[in-house]
């Protein structure tokens, strides 16, 4: 493949540009006024706690990665069921995903007191510091992802030896998928561990501090308050960074793999020549999206003394501006790459972008207290906590309808445009699936800026915490609160993109799995190959390689009357429920420990309520850290073990069912959990704004209970599901060789 | 089919026997002492309210049935896309399902005061009256189902004119499936409407009476207490009766339809001759199960002065005795019918029975306060309602693991035994699917007695209410409470059978759907047929008819890479979430109205708390009735409309995805809701038994909130899901002709 097109170099160059801008914004932020000594001290406490947590987390995760790398090495070099590059790709994916989280968190912990100080000057300055710090994370994530992708692509292109350039591209792209698995696993640990940490601290702080002792949020007398602020950083910032690194890289890699496969299989020689373009197209869309995101970040400007609506307008200008520019630019990319159906593929990109925006709007409708659903939940607080909970769960469940319909329409359109075939017949299937992948890439192409608006929320939140604990004037807290509220709305859009892209990427990975099963045949030893070919009634390896996706599936009896497929689906949905249950229980247990500890400190440390004695903050941080480390192992391990077990027992048919069931079940559950949690949170805020009795009334107490139940929903279990459904697919892909060689049924 | 085997007559005869025993038990119960005038008066109030509700309910449902019957008549006689018997079969299914609920409820409302009076004599007499009254419902349900099935079978056999006896059997069994749809729709209305009624009243009575006013449950001063007792009858008794009629008839009908299809397709002429036997085998297993259930009911005997453990032992002797006898007897049935693989099919029956028992045991483990999960939820009450809710939801989600694994193993075994092929290849698929149906029938064969133990719980509950309101001595209430507690445990087993059989039946119906699509081709007019054959690339009607299930599916591009299938799955899971959300919100809204009304009466009716003035019971009943009627229409309508819409837009591929996704998602959700709800209920009881502070403590108040949230989980949304997943399949089957003729994509 000496003929890599010059335009490809845009990808590594963009990654350098993005990382440079990230550094620039970081340096700018570091130069801002740090505020008073107290503010510095508190920020230092939080930073120390967050770094200590992350160090501990990476140690535990490191051990898991080493064990899995050994396993993959054994599979590659001992069992010969896998490409020898797999262990290395897996490790780098995990490393870069962790790095993205680390940089984001470091920035956030430096930014909190600076944003608080800036907010004490004006709302606009506060926004600027917080938003630019969020942009550091956004650009770091996309920059690292593009760097990693282009580096691996170039390296594998150099080292892999294959006379057939088309086959070589297939190998390269599937090896690169394993670095997606590393990123996913790291992200799952980050989300689950961080989510347990932050929600244990949050629930503990709220239940004893706000509800029992009646002191405000972030009050320095509350022993769990530092842990709560540490949690915002390790969960909402580091967790989200790793999560979106995984989403972004995963969508590009899955699409590249599908592109290699789709264009290899077309009959038309002219189209076959487009395979390389199909592989680099998603990378280029990502690169151009990143450049335009940087442009969008500069569009976010506000006048001095801007009000909330103008601030929101400023952010929207940035996001919408980027989206429109990307939609236009991607047409040119597809056109100049010379793709034969550039109009169709462009239709797929736009389908993805529109679907993401639509899901975001639906999320906003169901979770913002400007609309009826959340107001109704708030109203149910009049009859107590039980009816608040019932209403919130009900609303969350109903809120799955619109996102599912948007994904349905988006997927059908992305497929139909790319395949240029609306009968969905077998012939055009590879091209259609490639279109679904392209839609996911399109949806995430604005990540550079949407992630900035997402990450700035927790920074504003932390700035508020810092202001509260440093006894800054109340108007500062009010400003940071309005920045935080603004962040909640933009975060809703961000969540729409994250969930929607997860569904599309998982569908693309489902197809990659079948491709990988076919490729796995090429790794087998001669004896094993003969055995497997015989077992499944194939005549030769060449026959396997020449088969279309659907034909090959039929040979494996992957159809919807096969009980292995149907039972795989049952297990897939069950895995989603089990994963949510385990993480929810983990939060419940850890929060219970935190409640006991805060109650103990209130009881035993004399003078704590009068502000004369300092609470033992470190102990609360230690409790959350220990609980998170202990509790994250089981759910994360099951996410790896279930697809392996299903593959070994129920073979390809079972795995396809598992992934399809997990994807459909996981999507609905993720939307429900995110929206129930968001709606409870905002119903509480709606009451705090003076409705139904306002702060301190019985309805408010009921709404706080709803919000507390929603905490693990929206910040632990829900966001982890996006990763879970992709991780299960990635694990299945990496284990394809083992499944082919050793499956029982 | 002049050669119906004599052994078939066992089915109608058994139905007469079962109905006779039901009447016998009913007459015996009616002869018991009615108790004091107060007791009679209260029972009269409840009976009047329940009958008024049921009358109102049947009026609303009647209108829906008339509309749908007109639609089906138009489809059959106007559009010619359906068999002309369909409208009639649909109507009778609905009628008999409603009748089963009506008889059961009537018995229960006569039994409550008599059981209370008997319990004031001794625990044993109380058990006897309550259990025998429950048996009336069990035997009525199975008796009516067998009557309806055999009557239709004989009638269609007489009237349908078809030279080919094999084809005739196929037509007969698929027409009979439409009466399954009628039964399912009636059952869904009964469950949803009854569930909303009972939980609105229950939640309203508890929240204001127990939590706010601090008066005990069933206190006559509580205005909602009569409505609460009415609710037990219309929800738990009438709803359950209609539900299990639907499950029982549905499993037999689905299996008969699969039997007709499976044996039509085998190559072996000797096996083809077994088609009639395959059709009547499930009916016979049901009949023999009913006879042995009656024997089991007589096994339930207790000594005077028996303790709880002995009572439990007595019930278990009855249930287990019946199950073992049925396992043995079904071997003889299959053997004497002359089935070629009678050992294999017997394996399927036993797989079903064992799976049902195993799910029941798992349910008991997760919901009984004798085990750790529920005790841990109770412990979380120490830190308040939020942690109780989080723990209960978490436990419910985790509790899906074992039932799913049992269904997986049970399904794989049922399929493998029947197909005598553990490679799950295409050739043996019809036989394997028939085995899954047979397993569902086996699981439900003990329904006569398990339903008796299920239905006696609400009767004991009502007896307790009657005792409380009539100011009987406290030991009477204590006795009825222990009977109720006993009922909770046996009901767990009953729920296991209901949920497990729903999953297996839905899987069987998935195959029936494909069969029905093939049959639908035969109803089309010549023009339409030519158009459709051309559209899907078939050469002739004969080609369609000769195709195997899988081959036919492939022609329709029903495979797991087709976005229509995958999007159908997304919609299927979404339908489950939406349905739960709508029913939960309905309960929340109705309960809110009830809370307002009870608060108003406490405030406005002077002397109510001193017992000097009587509350306005009727108004609470009216509120629940109105709310239930209004709120049940939307969720039930969507259950009918969604499969129709998906069929019309996404064709067969979409529907198969919808049904598979709905089945997998619905099963997990149903288990979670039933178990979370049950665990919260029992966690509260565990605290009331004196743990973690006991009655009236803060943890108790937190646990009551958990229990209240669980009410719609376990008694409204959860049990309705079993019906939903089958109803969606049945609707798809009935609409097959429309889908074939008019689908867009």
Image (cartoon, coloured by chain):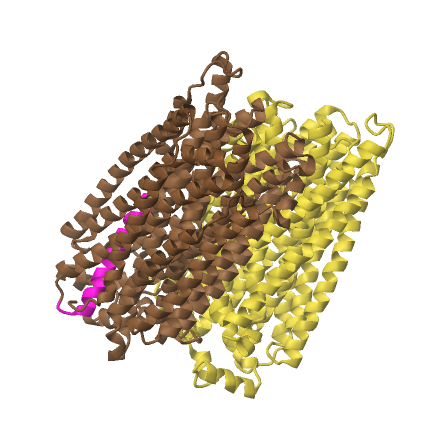
Chain colours: A yellow, B brown
| Residue A275 is at least partly visible in this image | no
Along the line of sight, the residue nearer the viewer: A272 or B503: B503
In the figure, residue B252 lies in which quadrant?
Answer: bottom left
Which residues lie in the magenta part?
B163-186
Magenta span: chief secondary structure: helix
Q: Is residue B476 positioned above or below A514 on the image?
A: above
* Residue B165 shown in magenta: yes
Q: Which residue is drawn at 40% across and 44% down?
A: B132
* Quadrant in the picture for the N terminus of chain B: bottom left
Report x, y in % for residue A158. 63, 75
How many marks overall? 0
Which quarter of the figure has residue A398? top left
Q: Please say if B247 is above or below B596.
A: below
Q: Position of residue B34 (x, y in %)?
A: 39, 31
| Residue A384 among those drawn in magenta | no
Determine if residue B93 is in view: yes
Nearer-the-camera pick, B493 or A57: B493
Judge whether B667 appears above or below A392 on screen.
below
Residue A426 percent coordinates (x, y): 36, 68
Q: Residue at x 53, y 71 (%)?
A: A649
Single out the residue that lies furthest toward the front: B304
């Amino acid at each position: 493949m000496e003929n890599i097109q010059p335009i490809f170099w845009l990808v590594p160059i963009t990654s350098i540009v993005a990382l440079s801008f990230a550094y620039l914004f970081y340096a700018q932020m570091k130069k801002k006024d740090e505020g008073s000594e107290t503010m510095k001290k508190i920020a230092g406490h939080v930073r120390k706690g967050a770094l200590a947590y992350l160090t501990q987390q990476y140690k535990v995760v490191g051990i898991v990665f080493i064990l899995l790398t050994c396993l993959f090495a054994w599979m590659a070099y001992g069992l010969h069921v896998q490409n020898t590059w797999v262990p290395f790709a897996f490790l780098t994916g995990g490393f870069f995903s962790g790095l993205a989280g680390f940089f984001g968190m470091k920035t956030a912990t430096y930014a909190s007191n600076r944003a608080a100080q800036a907010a004490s000057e004006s709302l606009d300055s506060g926004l600027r510091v917080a938003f630019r710090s969020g942009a550091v994370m956004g650009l770091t994530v996309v920059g690292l992802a593009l760097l990693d992708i282009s580096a691996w692509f170039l390296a594998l292109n150099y080292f892999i030896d294959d006379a057939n350039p088309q086959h070589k591209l297939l190998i390269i792209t599937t090896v690169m998928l394993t670095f997606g698995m590393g990123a996913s696993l790291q992200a799952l640990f980050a989300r689950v561990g961080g989510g347990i940490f932050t929600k244990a601290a949050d629930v503990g702080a709220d239940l004893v501090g706000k509800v029992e002792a009646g002191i405000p949020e972030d009050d320095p007398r509350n022993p769990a308050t530092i842990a709560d602020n540490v949690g915002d950083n390790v969960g909402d910032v580091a967790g989200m960074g790793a999560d979106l690194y995984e989403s972004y890289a995963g969508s590009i890699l899955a699409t590249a793999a599908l592109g290699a496969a789709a264009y290899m299989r077309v009959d038309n020689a002219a189209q076959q020549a487009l395979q390389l373009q199909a592989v680099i197209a998603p990378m280029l869309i990502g690169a151009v999206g990143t450049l335009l995101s940087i442009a969008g970040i500069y569009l976010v400007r506000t006048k001095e003394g801007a009000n909330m609506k103008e601030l929101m307008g400023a952010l929207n200008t940035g996001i919408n501006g980027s989206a429109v520019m990307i939609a236009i630019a991607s047409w040119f990319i597809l056109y100049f790459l010379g793709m034969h159906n550039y109009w169709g593929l462009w239709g797929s990109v736009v389908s993805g972008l529109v679907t993401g925006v639509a899901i975001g709007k639906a999320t906003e409708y169901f979770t913002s207290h400007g609309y009826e659903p959340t107001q109704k939940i708030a109203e149910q607080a009049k009859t107590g906590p039980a009816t608040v909970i019932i209403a919130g769960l009900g609303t969350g469940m109903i809120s799955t309808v619109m996102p599912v319909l948007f994904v349905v329409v988006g997927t059908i359109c992305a497929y139909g445009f790319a395949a240029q075939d609306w009968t969905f017949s077998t012939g055009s299937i590879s091209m259609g699936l490639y279109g679904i992948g392209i839609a996911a890439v399109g949806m995430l192409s604005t990540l550079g800026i949407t992630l900035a608006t997402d990450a700035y929320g927790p920074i504003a939140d932390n700035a508020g915490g810092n202001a509260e604990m440093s006894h800054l004037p109340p108007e500062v807290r009010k400003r940071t609160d309005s920045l935080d509220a603004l962040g909640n709305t933009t975060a809703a859009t961000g969540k729409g993109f994250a969930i929607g892209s997860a569904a599309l990427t998982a569908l693309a990975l489902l197809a990659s799995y079948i491709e990988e099963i076919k490729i796995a045949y090429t790794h087998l030893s001669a004896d094993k190959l003969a055995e497997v070919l015989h077992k499944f009634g194939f005549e030769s390896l060449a026959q396997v390689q020449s088969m279309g996706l659907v034909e090959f599936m039929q040979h494996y009896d992957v159809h919807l009357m096969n009980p292995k497929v149907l039972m795989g689906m049952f297990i897939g949905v069950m895995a989603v429920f089990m994963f949510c249950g385990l993480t929810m229980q983990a939060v419940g247990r850890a929060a219970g420990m935190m409640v006991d500890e805060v109650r103990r400190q209130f009881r035993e440390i004399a003078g704590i309520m009068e502000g004369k004695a300092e609470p033992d903050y470190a102990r609360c941080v230690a409790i959350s850290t220990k609980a998170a480390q202990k509790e994250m192992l089981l759910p994360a391990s099951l996410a790896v073990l279930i697809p392996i077990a299903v593959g070994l027992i129920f073979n390809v048919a079972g795995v396809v069912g598992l992934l399809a069931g997990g994807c459909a079940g996981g999507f609905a559950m993720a939307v429900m959990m995110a929206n129930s949690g968001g709606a409870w949170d905002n119903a509480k805020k709606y009451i705090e704004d003076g409705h139904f009795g306002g702060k301190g009334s019985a309805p408010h107490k009921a709404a706080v209970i709803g919000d507390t139940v929603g905490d693990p929903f929206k910040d632990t279990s829900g966001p982890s599901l996006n990763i879970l459904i992709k991780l299960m697919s990635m694990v299945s892909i990496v284990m394809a060789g083992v499944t082919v060689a050793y499956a029982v049924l």
